[in-house]
Amino acid sequence: MIATALIFMMASQAQEPALIPTPARLEIKSGSFNLSESTRVLIDPQAINLKTAVAELLGRALRARKSSRNKLHLSIEKDRTSMGEEGYHLSVKPSEITIQSATSKGLFYGLQTLRQLLPASIYGGAQASVWAIPCVEIDDWPRFPWRGLMIDSSRHFMPKSEILKFVDLLAMHKMNVLHLHLVDDQGWRIEIKRYPKLTEIGSKRDFDSQGHFGDELYGGKKHGGFYTQQDIRDIVRYARERYITVVPEIEMPGHSQAAIDAYNELGTGDRPGVTDEWGSHGNVYNVNESTIKFLQNVLKEVMQLFPSKFIHIGGDEVSHDQWQLSPSAQALKKERGLKDEQELQSWFIRQMDAFLADHGRRLIGWDEILMGGLAPGATVMSWRGIDGGIAAAKAGHDVVMAPTSHTYFDYYQSKFRAKEPPAGGGYLPLETVYQFDPVPSVLSDAEAKHILGGQCQLWAEYIPTPSHLEYMAFPRAAALAEVVWSPKKSLDFADFRARLVQHLKRLDVLEVNYRRLDPPMPAPIGHWSPAEVSEQLQTKEWEATPALHGAGTYDVLFEYTVGECRLDIAWVELLEDGKTIARDAHDGRTGAQDMKNQYRLTLADQKPGSTYLVRAGVRSDGGTDSSGDVYFIRSP
Ligand code: ACM
């Protein structure tokens, strides 16, 4: 919370409202406004969409509008332009609430804030005869114009109802971009009238699907689904009413196996099948004129459905093997004087860039579109870290930051993987998301203007259901929403977390299956370092007494931090005054990929004055270069 607000809060003894994202300026005043059925609502005739928004957001609280004793006044004020088109002023006084903005969009965000000043039950359409709203003065505007979330509907199809639920959740968090990843090797998910086989064939796979370790995670069932054009229109309209732009992604030239299976002439070899394995695959579109035309025809239909200025064409993880072996690709390379396959890829992307520009749109793609030279109008979505974004911004291109390190919400939310549903790997806790700053410090002020904002990604290989999508998205998306909206100087994780506890009650009412907050992670009970490991199985011990809190179940977690070698673990024991009282023997390992690196020990009774040790049988997988930490944590 900002310092001025703290002073006001202390002066008035008022409760700090749990606003997420936290506003740019907040003053808490004494007194309150009584919102009731008799509150009169005045909506500026110039405002659009807001009747529905008021009805939806404040619900039956405002059923009757008879009395003029107190009023809620929403007005478009051109002199609020200095706050930007999304900024708003919200004033709650005992007799009147006013929300002012230069645009309807700003008023909509003001309403979202007003809603967070009401009890959480408002999110369920609850009714009270009178609600006291604390008096506040708020000036608020976003730090970035692009505040996005990506849903991957290719790896697992997400039904329209869930997409609409996410639209509401994004609006509530003042996010404004929903990026739909509609096409990948594992499924084509959007109806294209001109090419019906894209969905007839490309939206289905026989098997769902293998994990990284070859396990049959999702029972081997068939998987399929796609959005009809009417579904897309419904989603786009619903989003537009909530000031959210839906950005479609049509992957090319890689990640195209489902499309190539549907129309084999787009590829360079035999029909590949719609793959049931995760990871990126070697199939790429060929570079024939007919294929370029095919994809531009697809984009034509996509542009008719999505009014978004930006159209995402993917462009990531393109294997060049097939082009190297393809006579037509090699001939085109020669004819155009292109040095290598990277330049060929760049040529491919430029065909799309020019086509989209001709239709008044702008191309956005993953940072691999920088390879071989960036197309003139292209905007870069930087995912392999931030370097691609930095290079693009320095070259004068717009950038959306989406680095794996802070925004890949397919990563685990806890180090205790055994307690989490399977995920692709990686570790991205709430706190790290909150540390995300889309503007790298190496950029000058002028270059930093090219950073449009940031976005989180819900890659769905390991997200088979809507409720699981919510589990991976929240509360991390609330943290992301705050860092892309709120001024950098007002960001404070401890304060955010305190507000989040209240905010989660809203998500409860909305029946969002968010992940519960962790207690703070304790310090490790010990470490291992290169001097202490070898290829031979050996015994190591760490003192556990200070970490014990009475009888119960405890988890021992081995967490590799650095080094060439992983640590393999054979067994773990708990010793009381030198005597083994609990043991968990299974093969585990921790390294770049962890597997079963958590051991469970039960203590029946903690004896006062006794000494407890954790003992483990460990070895490296070759050499000594391995370091890491050992945690001992009571299981909830
Ligand atoms: C990506 O994660 N391949 C964009």
Image (cartoon, rainbow, N blue to C red):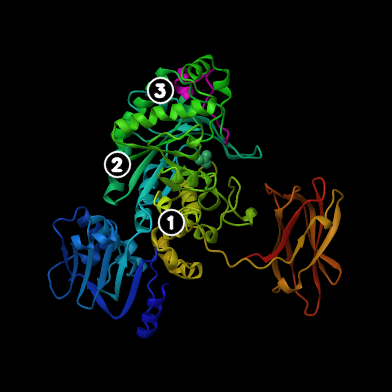
Q: Which residue is mark 2?
A: 234
Label located before the other in sequence (3 or 2): 2
Marks 3 and 2: CB-CB under 8 Å?
A: no
Mark 1, other Cα within 10 Å: few <14 / some 14–19 / many ≥20: many
Mark 2, other Cα within 10 Å: few <14 / some 14–19 / many ≥20: some
The numbered mark at residue 79 is: none
Q: Quick check: 561 left or right of 10? A: right
Examine the rendering and report whether any part of residue 429 can be seen: yes
Q: Which residue is mark 3?
A: 292
Residue 48: x, y in percent? Answer: 19, 53
Label located before the other in sequence (3 or 1): 3
- Residue drawn at 29 percent across, 35 percent down: 360
Q: Quick check: 37 left or right of 272? A: left
Mark toward the viewer: 3 or 2: 3
Marks 3 and 1: CB-CB under 8 Å?
A: no
Magenta-tinted stretch? 260-279
Q: Quick check: 630 left or right of 450? A: right
Say which quarter of the image contains residue 605. Answer: bottom right
Q: Amino acid at mark 1?
A: Val
Q: Quick check: 226 left or right of 608? A: left
**Residue 554 in magenta?**
no
The numbered mark at residue 512 is: 1
- Residue drawn at 49 percent across, 28 percent down: 345
Residue 187: x, y in percent? Answer: 47, 32
Q: CA distance from mark 1 to mark 2?
A: 22 Å
Q: Amino acid at mark 2?
A: Asp
